[in-house]
């Protein structure tokens, strides 16, 4: 029988508790006619997984496999011909359900159900197998390894919606700022914007991460820990366009105050997270410049397919910071990835290798 990694309940207050990991056994998969069974090869962490362990995320479930990002091979299907066509194909899982195509948000009255660790969705990717509807998988672009493919779904989808759907400025010659470079979403936002022909600038508290971002195509970057970083960034902008067109932000805090000084009139701040502060003042200078703040979270099934096709067409490769090997037996190694996330030391995605990369012998 297949196994999975979940969190085990212990006593503690939200934000103070840190739920330990434990391995459980799952029932043998029995796909319905329209379902496929994916033998997972790799899975990747997101910040929501750390929040789950700290009881800082809604709907926590202690028997549901963790993680929303996963890659693998379809090893069994239901009787539906559309399901059968996926047999033996390398796939990634759509990281959430309930949102097909509407540009404003999920159509499902119950909302968007992200994979991994909550009662809203029984599927998670830190497991040996996952059973999903055949319409919830996409074929892995051939240039990607199992590790890279696992690093793509949630961060890729989130970045795609923030950059392409929400910013309205993903086009050649536009100046885009991506804040907090180093995390998976920020790096994918950088890659998408560069591939779209934008001039991309970044912020980070680490000079090393800024240099790595330049190697991925960023024009320049500034350290947000330095006083007056906004003026330093403005000096980097080209003479013919001394304004930003959009900011892709995952931190919140004072981004409107800083952004109003840097953005063009009618510029956009596309926000996919607020990791620094859950509150973000909207100041009068932003009103006078007609600055728009647009919330952006995850994305639709349609956007997921578009994102995957773009990655394939442009040969983009998600950045993998570190891989825990040894499969699901290596709880210590998996815990180590969570520690990297706690410290914010990663540049790119943190990946768990469930099956050795490129090895199909265990199917």
Image (tube, rainbow, N blue to C red):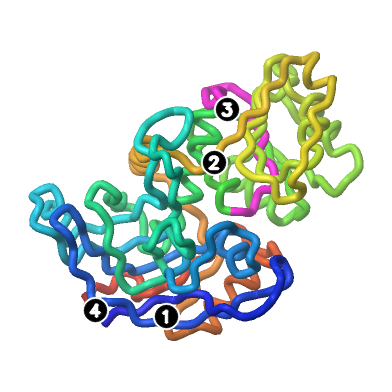
Give above or below for 27 relative to 191: below
- Examine the image and state in which quarter residue 221 appears: top right
- Alpha carbon separation for disc pair 4 and 1: 14 Å
Residue 205, image x, y percentages: 78, 52
- Alpha carbon separation for disc pair 4 and 3: 43 Å
Q: Secondary structure at mark 1?
A: helix
Residue 343 in view (yes/no): yes
Q: Who is closer to the viewer here, 89 or 122?
A: 122
- Alpha carbon separation for disc pair 3 and 2: 13 Å
Give above or below for 320 relative to 317: below
Residue 56, image x, y percentages: 65, 61
- Alpha carbon separation for disc pair 3 and 1: 39 Å
Which mark sits nearer the N-terminus, 4 or 1? Answer: 1
- Badge 3 is on which residue? 167
Q: Which residues are magenta?
A: 168-183
| Residue 60 lies within the magenta run | no
Of the residues tagged 4 and 1, which is closer to the observer?
Answer: 1
Q: Secondary structure at mark 4?
A: loop
- Badge 2 is on which residue? 297
- Examine the image and state in which quarter residue 175 appears: top right
> Label 2: how many residues lie within 10 Å, few (<14), some (14-19) or many (20+)?
some
- Badge 1 is on which residue? 328
| Residue 178 lies within the magenta run | yes
Q: Secondary structure at mark 2?
A: loop
- Badge 4 is on which residue? 362
């Amino acid at each position: 029988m297949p196994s999975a990694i979940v969190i085990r309940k212990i006593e503690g207050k939200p934000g103070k508790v840190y739920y330990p990991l434990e391995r459980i056994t799952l029932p043998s998969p029995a796909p319905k006619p329209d379902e496929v069974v994916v033998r997972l090869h790799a899975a990747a962490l997101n910040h929501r997984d750390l929040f789950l362990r700290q009881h800082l995320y809604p709907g926590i479930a202690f028997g549901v496999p963790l993680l929303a990002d996963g890659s693998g091979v379809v090893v069994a299907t239901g009787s539906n011909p559309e399901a059968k066509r996926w047999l033996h194909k390398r796939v990634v899982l759509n990281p959430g359900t309930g949102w097909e195509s509407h540009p404003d948000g999920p159509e499902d009255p119950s909302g968007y159900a992200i994979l991994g660790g909550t009662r809203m969705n029984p599927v998670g990717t830190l497991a040996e197998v996952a059973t999903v509807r055949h319409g919830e998988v996409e074929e892995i672009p051939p240039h990607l390894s199992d590790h890279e493919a696992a690093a793509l779904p949630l961060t890729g989808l989130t970045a795609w919606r923030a950059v392409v759907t929400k910013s309205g400025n993903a086009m050649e010659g536009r100046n885009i700022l991506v804040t907090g470079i180093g995390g998976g979403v920020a790096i994918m936002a950088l890659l998408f914007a560069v591939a779209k022909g934008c001039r991309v600038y970044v912020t980070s508290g680490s000079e090393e991460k800024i240099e790595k971002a330049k190697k991925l195509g960023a024009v320049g970057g500034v350290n947000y820990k330095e006083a007056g970083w906004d003026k330093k960034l403005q000096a980097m902008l080209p003479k013919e366009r001394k304004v930003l067109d959009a900011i892709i932000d995952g931190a919140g805090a004072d981004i409107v105050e800083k952004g109003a000084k840097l953005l063009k009139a009618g510029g956009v701040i596309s926000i996919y997270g607020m990791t620094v502060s859950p509150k973000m003042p909207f100041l009068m200078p932003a009103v006078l410049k007609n600055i728009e703040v647009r919330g952006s979270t995850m994305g639709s099934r349609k956007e997921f397919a578009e994102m995957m096709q773009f990655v394939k067409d442009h040969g983009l490769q998600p950045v993998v910071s570190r891989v825990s090997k040894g499969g699901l037996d290596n709880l210590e190694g998996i815990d180590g990835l969570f520690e990297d996330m706690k410290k914010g030391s990663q540049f790119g995605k943190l990946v768990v290798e469930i099956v050795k990369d490129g090895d199909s012998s265990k199917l």
